[in-house]
Image (cartoon, grey):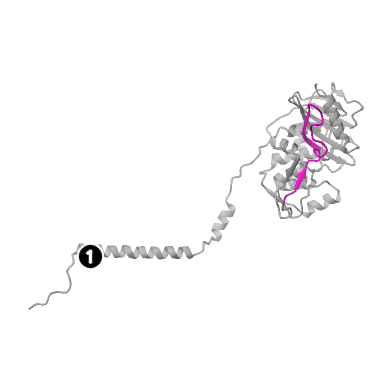
Amino acid sequence: MHEKNKYVKTSPGFRFLYTALTVILALLLLYAVYLILRQEEPHVITQTQLESMETEEIEIEVTTEPFAVHIEYPVGLESAKAFDSTIASKYCVLLDTESNAVIAQRDAEKKMYPASMTKVMTLIVAVENMTSLDDTFTMTHDILAPLYDADASMAGFQEHEVITVKDMLYGAILPSGADATAGLARKIVGSEEEFVKLMNEKAAALGLHNTNFTNTSGLHNNNHYSTALDMAVILNYALKNDLCREILSTYQYTTSKTKEHPEGILLESTMFSRMYGDEVEGVQIKGGKTGFTSEAQHTMASFAEKNGKEYILVTAYEDDKWGSVYDAFDIYENYLDK
């Protein structure tokens, strides 16, 4: 009697299917192990990848555009009214920006020292040549030390403080900070000397008659001078740019928080600290820039609106801190069209 065979004979098709399934399961198992191991490995950036990231060019949207405006030099100086003896400022001019005509003046083309009215030109050149308001600059000892020695007005930035271009623009105009103007110059073109060249180039482009700058702040130098009428042209040009107008019109501004100033610095306009702007009935004094040095005495360039028309006024060389302000009140009250 024959014993039965213990093994079942399988077809070739079944053996192939069995082998394929075994291979697939093995591959799935290996892939699962790979995924587990991959999750446990730290993500390492190679030096090549790092260098690629550092040198990648990122397109930054510029927040402002260069001025695309042209303004003519004011007309009517010879036929303008003369300010009477109640106006104490030695040099002054009142300009109607709509007609670009001088309404009234006193020695408006005589050379005088502009003091910190200079910073309006600094603002213009900075805004025209900066890359971004968010760019930063680290304040240095070699900038601050000579400014403190010269008793210059300061915004209050400290050595090693990282400051944005925007904060320096406001710092230059509101508290009249020489630290801010020097920082802008160093950040934008590398040095104050090169920045001053741009200021003088802009003065020439505007057709100014008797203006020359030697620094960004208005600290006294015999070769740093302007006229009341030239300063009126500079302010008129600045007001064509929205950012410049906004800064010149601001009463208070708080800078970005930094390690040195965790709450930021509260900056206050030197002009609006002396007035509200609505002291003259029917007139709104909207902004401007004050200045002072011993040689220049008190100066102020301001702009105001009455009945929808805008005017620019420069009052310079007044020996009292409030004199240029009261002169502005008197002029805006008595010399504008009724």
Q: Is residue 8 above or below residue 337?
A: below
Q: Main secondary structure of the magenta part?
A: loop
The residues colored magenta run 263-289
Tell me the element at label 1: helix
For mark 1, does the 10 Å Cα neighbourhood hold few (<14), some (14 to 19), or many (20 or more) residues? few
- Residue 53 lies within the magenta run: no
Picture coordinates of residue 26, whole percent (x, y): 34, 65
Q: Is residue 242 left or right of residue 112?
A: left
**Residue at the far right in the pictured view:** 85
Observer able to see residue 223:
no
Identify the residue at image location x=87%, y=32%: 326
Picture coordinates of residue 289, whole percent (x, y): 80, 37
Q: Is residue 47 left or right of residue 34?
A: right
Query: Residue 299 sits in which quadrant?
Result: top right
Q: How many marks?
A: 1
Query: Residue at label 1?
Result: 15
Q: Which quadrant, please, contains the N terminus?
A: bottom left
Identify the residue at image location x=48%, y=65%: 40
For this rendering, which residue is in front, 137 or 262?
262
Picture coordinates of residue 126, whole percent (x, y): 72, 41
Q: Amino acid at mark 1?
A: Arg
Identify the residue at image location x=85%, y=27%: 105
- Residue 271 lies within the magenta run: yes
Picture coordinates of residue 12, whole percent (x, y): 20, 64
**Residue at the far bottom in the pictured view:** 1
Q: Is residue 2 above or below residue 107?
A: below
For this rendering, which residue is in front, 217 or 33?
33
Q: Is residue 138 above or below residue 243?
A: below
Query: Residue 321 sits in which quadrant?
Result: top right
Q: Is residue 22 above or below residue 337?
A: below
Observer able to see residue 184:
yes
Q: Which quadrant, please, contains the C terminus?
A: top right
